[in-house]
Amino acid sequence: MNYSIKENKLVINNDIEIEFLYNVAKVVQFEDIYVCLLSPPLGEKMNENITCVTSKGEVLWIVEKIIPEEKDFPYVDIMKRGDKLIASSWAGFRVGIRLENGKIAWRRITK
């Protein structure tokens, strides 16, 4: 399946259009699911800025918080490593995210 990004929309197969609150910065595809890194505007606190959707446009999950504090630690990158999803945050956290539910499997500090 192919996809394209149009600002705050993910378009799958030129047919299914999924609209998000924020612009889509990056997409990582795992078979028929799409993990989207959203880009909230500067100054707006949005730490749960990774969303996973199906090829039918259904939201499967929104990533859990890195830490329960109220600080501004948005994710800035996502990457695929084999069948694993890795994400990095602005604050220097690197985390493994479970594809089935968006929960954090592990975390490391990189800074």
Image: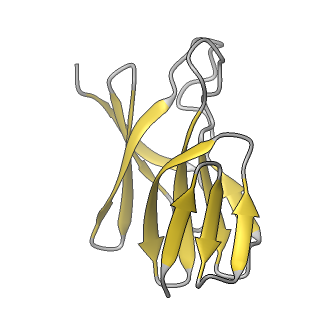
Residue 101, visible in the rendered structure: no
Residue at 53 percent across and 31 percent down: it is: 66
User: Which of 37/100 is in front?
Assistant: 37
User: Which of 1/79 is in front?
Assistant: 1
In the picture, measured across the screen, residue 30 lies left or right of residue 111, that is right
- Residue 30 coordinates in the image, percent (x, y): 45, 76
Residue extending furthest toward the left: 111
Residue 109, visible in the rendered structure: yes
Residue at 65 percent across and 18 percent down: it is: 45
Q: Is residue 67 above or below residue 97?
A: above
- Residue 98 coordinates in the image, percent (x, y): 51, 60
Quadrant in the rendering for residue 65: top right
- Residue 101 coordinates in the image, percent (x, y): 63, 61
Q: Is residue 34 above or below residue 77?
A: below
Residue at 39 percent across and 19 percent down: it is: 91
Quadrant assignment for the C terminus: top left
User: Which of 82/32 is in front?
Assistant: 32
Quadrant in the rendering for residue 11: bottom right
